[in-house]
Amino acid sequence: MNIVIADDEKLILQGMAFIITQMNANDRIVAQCYDGEEALAFCLQEGANVDVLITDVCMPNKDGLDLITELARACPHIQTIVMSGFGEFDYVRRAMREGAIDYLLKPVIKNELQAVLDRIRNQESPVSRAGGYDKRESPLGPSVYHDNLLNALFHNNPGMAPDARAYLENRYGISEHQYVFLAAGVSIDEIPGSPFQQADRMLFQYFIRKMAEEALFLLQPEGGTVWQGQDGFVVLLFFVKKGNERASDISASLDHLLALLASHVQYPVTIGLSSALDKFSLFPELLGQVQASLRARLTMGTGKVIRYEDSLNLLNQWSVKQDSFHKVVMATVLGDVEIVEKELYVLLADLYKATVHPEVLLDMILRLFLRVEDALEAKGIRPSDVGLSDWGKLQRDLEKCPTWVALESEVMSRLTEWAGLIQEKQLEVKPTFITDAVNYIHIHYASDLTLAEVADVVGLYPTYLSEQFKVRMGVKFIDYVINIRMEKAKKLLRETNKPSFEICEKVGYATPAHFTKVFKNKVGCTPVEYREGWRELRKL
């Protein structure tokens, strides 16, 4: 193949050229370019006959991204490979979108370079550039056969399992009589509100696979292999000779892989590690243990290696405080969004500290939702009117939450949404003077608000408004005002760095001492303690 190399570092150009010509006599370096402008000009000239371009991402004049974009339009037959350094995953992602067929991580390893060029050389049809990397064939090429066989073993496909066992025995020289096997799954911990696009997820999973192959098995191919499921989920399979148990070595290797991934990208990643099993027929159990380990992220935290044995130490039951559910349920049914947030925050914090098994945790949350449903029906409100109807979808959405933060966000979102809808329905039947009073409170809560002032606004005697407010809103006037002020204060404590003395003025209190006293009475801690506790929880 005729190959062009573009990099602004002379030593890299010379080193790459030397390695490529040494690896295959049929490969020829036709140009070494110091920037994208020079590389593009060479590729566009008549008679250049370029097959492959290997380019750095960051170069002067025209960088690798612009070069790949323009080359994909002008010379779609040229296969492009992008080189990147640490922390440049976002550049790689954009390059793959623009049509790059593969990428190399600096410093480039000879075996990896050869593997990439061999994949290009052996592919049966050219890669389609039209739709970006999410529309083309898998860049792994020959690995598809490898992955299909391992998928058959791990998912107990009886038709392919014998071939898969023979493949592992012949390729890696292993047998279940001499080896035990461990599996590790690598999962992206997606952030609520900013999930990956499917194409980005595919590229990131491919990136994880390549990093795992390079870090763990490139120099010791007999130690294991990597494969991907149909959804792109990356699984590492380790081969360990019996009598030479090295689970601790594997854990250390996975810690190293996790550190490498963290140094390249900003997305959090968790690895679940199975126990050791000694039969091919037990591979589905290996995968089940990996998935159970990853589910334990909900209570054990993310961005770490979680061993299946450690996940078994999680509690299988949790002693619920007698009034924990009741407060959340009643606040939801009353349509009080602020109180729902307050009580649910306390309940979820207790749940998190309990370190219960994920299945127990999800069961507790579903029980909470069932209590809300029962309370709504008892009050004559149809659960379906507030969006509480499709229990199957509700359970699936909860199970999809990969992390505690995601689960917390999902539960908080659901309950506050239901409370808001209930509040709207309650306001539909409330007298105008009540809705006017509530609206006035929400606007003027930061002033020296009194019952007499609000009564004057809505045209009623204070005593009558006080009685009707308690009946219609389910809470005394003064308590409602305090609750509004406390929720506004908590929001400012969570979302700003304003000191307490400034916040107290913004929520209607003349002195910090009075504000702190009321806050502690209602919330159970001082404003400073609340802010510190919230920040500590965010770190988990």
Image (cartoon, grey):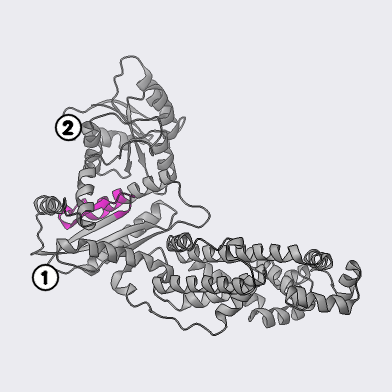
Residues shaded magenta: 209-234
**Whether residue 57 is visible:** no
Give x and y (percent) for residue 137: 31, 37
Question: Taking 231 as reference, is 409 left or right?
Answer: right
Label 2 or label 1, whichever lies nearer to me, is 1
Q: Is residue 10 above or below residue 260?
A: above
Labelled disc at residue 458: none
| SS for callout 1 | loop
Q: Is residue 20 above or below residue 349?
A: above
Mark nearer the N terminus (2 vs 1): 2
Q: Which residue: 55% across, 78% down? A: 325
Quadrant, the N terminus: top left
* Crowd around label 1: few <14 · some 14–19 · many ≥20 (10 Å): few
Q: Which residue: 23% across, 32% down? A: 123
Seen as rendered, the residue at the extreme top is: 46
Task: Determine the CA span between mark 2 and mark 1.
Answer: 41 Å
User: Disc 2 residue type?
Assistant: Asn
Q: Which residue: 33% across, 44% down? A: 106
Q: Check disc 1 and report the residue beneath it.
A: 243
Question: Taking 332 as reference, is 180 left or right?
Answer: left
**Whether residue 354 is visible:** yes
Q: Check disc 2 and report the residue beneath it.
A: 24
Camera-side residue of 215 and 325? 325
Give x and y (percent) for residue 414: 56, 63
Give the tally of numbered discs.
2
